[in-house]
Image (cartoon, grey):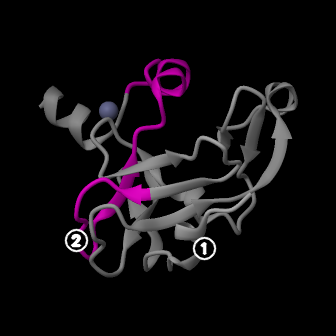
Amino acid sequence: MKHPETHTEVPAATRTGRSSAGIGLFATAPIKKGALIIEYTGERITVDEADQRGGQYLFQVTDTLTIDGRGRENKARYINHSCRGNAEAEHLEDGDRIFIRAKRAIKEGEEITYHYGKEFFETYIKPKGCRCVKCTEVKK
Ligand SMILES: [Zn+2]
């Protein structure tokens, strides 16, 4: 499968660090709107296998394909959920890869976040209470 655009793009400069939700991923240089931040990498498994394995780093790509991003080399797994994130996961229609892109311009030092999706939110985040900036602002 070819993704000419993403093949030539250089991922953004990022580092892991402490965030309000544990460990997070932060920009170490400004990132332009629409720019590639990082690829969500990992083992390709079936959705059925993913259901058996469980875990919080499963990223469902299509109806049948899931990426298990638990490996430490997958830095994208450190990106926290936010209901008002500055990044988004790009699903390519014919693709089997997930690219995280900047939804707006991101400043140096800013934490990178994206919305994990309605299903993940309802299942894993909502029961514990969402700790993202948007949700904690509302409660104050
Ligand atoms: Zn939230």
Q: In this image, 109 relative to 70: left or right?
A: left
**Residue at point 28%, 73% (across, down):** 109
Quickly name the residue at label 2.
107
2 or 12: nearer the eye? 2
Q: Position of residue 33 (x, y in %)?
A: 27, 63
Q: Quadrant of residue 19?
A: bottom left
Q: Residue 102: horizontal and vertical position, in percent?
A: 34, 59
Instruction: For the C terminus, give its image quadrant.
Output: top left
The amino acid pointed to by label 2 is Lys
| The magenta segment | 101-129
User: Pointer 1: what residue?
Assistant: 7
- Whether residue 79 sits left or right of residue 50 in the image: it is left
Is residue 110 on the magenta stretch? yes
Mark 1 closeness class: few <14, some 14–19, many ≥20 residues within 10 Å: few
Q: Residue at x 59, y 69 (%)?
A: 4
Label 1, label 2: how far apart the Cα atoms are: 24 Å
Q: In the image, residue 107 lies at what x, y percent?
A: 22, 71
Residue count near mark 2 (Cα–Cα under 10 Å), binned few <14, some 14–19, many ≥20: some
